[in-house]
Image: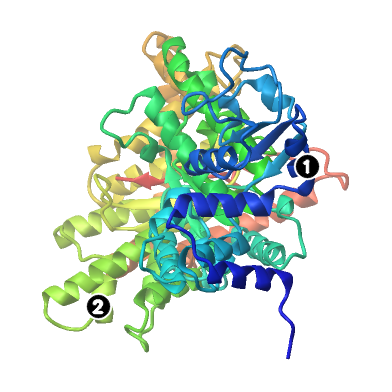
Amino acid sequence: MREKSKAELEEDALADAPEPFDPVGVVATEILHAALPRSVLVAVRRGEPRIFALDVPGSGWLSPIATALRGRFENADVRIPIDMVSTPAKGRSSTIVHGPTFLVLGDPMRLPPELVAGADIRISVRPTARALRRALTRLYGKRAVVRPADFAGLDGPEIFVALRPGSTPREVVARWRRIAMSLSAPVAADRTPVLEDLAGYGEAKSRLLAIAEDIRRVRDGKLSGAELPSLLLHGRPGTGKTMLARSLSKSVGLPLVQTSIGDWFSGERAHLGTVIGQARQFFERAASAAPCIALIDELDALPDRMHLEARDREWWTPIITMVLLSIDRLRATSRGVVLIGATNHYRHLDEALVRPGRFDNHLELSGPTTEQDFAEILRQHLNSALPDADLSGVARAALARGATGAVVESWVRAARERARSNARDLILADLVEQATPSPDRSPEKELAIALHEASHAVVGRILGFKVRSVTLVRQGAVAGKASFTEDDAPTTKAQIESHIVCGLAGRAGDELLNGAAEGGAIGDLHTATGLVAATHAAYGLQGRLSSVGSIEDAVVALRFDRSLAGKVEADLQRLMGEARRLVALHRGAIQCLARTLVANRVITQTEVDDAIAADPASRAAAVWGRIVERVTEGGQDSDGAGEQPDALQGPALPEGGR
């Protein structure tokens, strides 16, 4: 028969002699018993004037630990932050040490800094499975089974509230688990996929998988918690920043402690002190929950101090400073906390917030980029519905429309609602209706808009631009849109003019194919005007070297400079003529593409290229273009001297729409 260990014999003795029911005192005493080394006990017994700094995980532990210290060491001075309880000996300076002194640190900034800095020893005081097991045995007279996962993420008050007279250790542990689940984001019970099943995250998914593996190594004792990085996730709304943090939490089985800047202001009266208090509470909870995932959402709601007015800076600086120091302290003292920040507006963040050491890895989430990504996202949200359906059409529409994962999820929800309202099961048509909704315009108007957008797309493609999508799906006030990929911005005069010609092609299509120009394409004219004005007055590409500033400044200059306005108008008329020439030359491809667009509602570059390839005029133009290119190349020196900018290789385009 195996002999019991010393710890087991001690717990048996505790079980044989249960004490009066004092849950807070018993738990705090056992935690101290586990944390204080023998050298501290000896120094206190001898009355040595030494300072012992005890780091507790949150404000909920301050008073219980201080009370337990006073009960155990009558000759010691115990101090906690001055705005709560402070008990230095009467008549003595708060910074003079006459005997053993314990500093209970929930926040070192709220105690005299000279005392904190002068501490002889610093001790981390945390609830451990063994300490809580001993406490339960003392309180209930029965052996208890407690594991770290049972109380992960709980501060003192949450642990204490589960300790009730007449309970059993098993019931208490079950309460801890329920409380931990309710306080953390509900990742375990929801439909959040694990990291391995996520689609459309690219490099970010690979990085999170590596971090997940490091977290598992920390949990297994093979890696120090100090090695875990912090992350800053940024990208446009709906790209899945919060989902990624939740998925990481679920994948590694750690609690997710989540907040947002908006949460800090959610009280009835958001005074400076209450906002700071809410922020501090988040960091304390993250520290007490370690190991855990700690997420700060809407990080861009903290303004960049460089762009604040003096009055605003005076109000915001204490908040931002507290957040910066809290991040530093959390990362320095709380091993096993993976801090994640999320923002839609990366460029709006304060430089001090995003520097290495606070957020080490900056990952941009661009959203799904392939039809396969969208098909997998659709399948995730559909679960077992439509198991045999071909989702490629919906996935293609999502890609063409530049949808995000959040948009696709909203389509699935709306499709389910449509099916329920018709008292039937979900069918593929419900989903198709969300991705490519039926037109709400007359067939004639639909074709007119299609010809406008097809003119943008075909001319843009002829000029060498890459088409991302063309759509007739209404988006707010925009009736249709031709979108192009975002490559480098235009730099030469030839590139900018190709850019402008593509933008004017929609108006040319209206004139030549729809009977007359319309005022709905005002955005195209505004963009073209700004770019032409900038070549004259801002970019120094038309002989004039003096610059008025930005494109917007160049547009303003048109109102006051008649000479500049005349030059801009002349250039616009010349480029409009080129747009008309290209539309007329490729009208067959444009009309073919417009018919395809009306039928499918959303198309991609594949359909644009097919329409151009099927048009004899376009094929002939392409052949002549290649002949000219070969002749031009043949006339150049072998070293490339005399090479001219290629006016047909356009840069990124604005989204043409009407």
Check the picture and name the quadrant holding the C terminus.
top left
Secondary-structure class at tag 1: helix
Question: Spatial distance from mark 1 to mark 2, Cα to Cα?
Answer: 78 Å
Above or below, 223 against 237 in this view is below
Residue 182 visible: yes
Give the left or right position of residue 454, taking residue 324 as reference: left
Pick the front one: 48 or 401: 48
Neighbor class of circle 1 (other Cα within 10 Å; few <14, some 14-19, many 20+) is: few
Give coordinates of residue 189: x percent, y percent: 40, 71
The residue shown at (37%, 31%) is 526
Pick the front one: 124 or 321: 124
Give coordinates of residue 237: x percent, y percent: 42, 49
| Mark linked to residue 42 | 1
Q: Would you identify the image quadrant in which residue 172 lies?
A: bottom left
Q: Which residue lies most toward the left here?
A: 422
Secondary-structure class at tag 2: helix
Check the picture and name the quadrant holding the N terminus.
bottom right
Residue 354 visible: no
Give the left or right position of residue 298, taking residue 636 as reference: left
The residue shown at (74%, 52%) is 227
Neighbor class of circle 2 (other Cα within 10 Å; few <14, some 14-19, many 20+) is: few
Q: Amino acid at mark 1?
A: Val
Above or below, 197 against 358 in this view is below
Above or below, 150 against 265 in this view is below
| Mark linked to residue 429 | 2
The residue shown at (33%, 43%) is 507
Give the left or right position of residue 417, taking residue 65 as reference: left
Q: Which residue lies most toward the right here?
A: 639
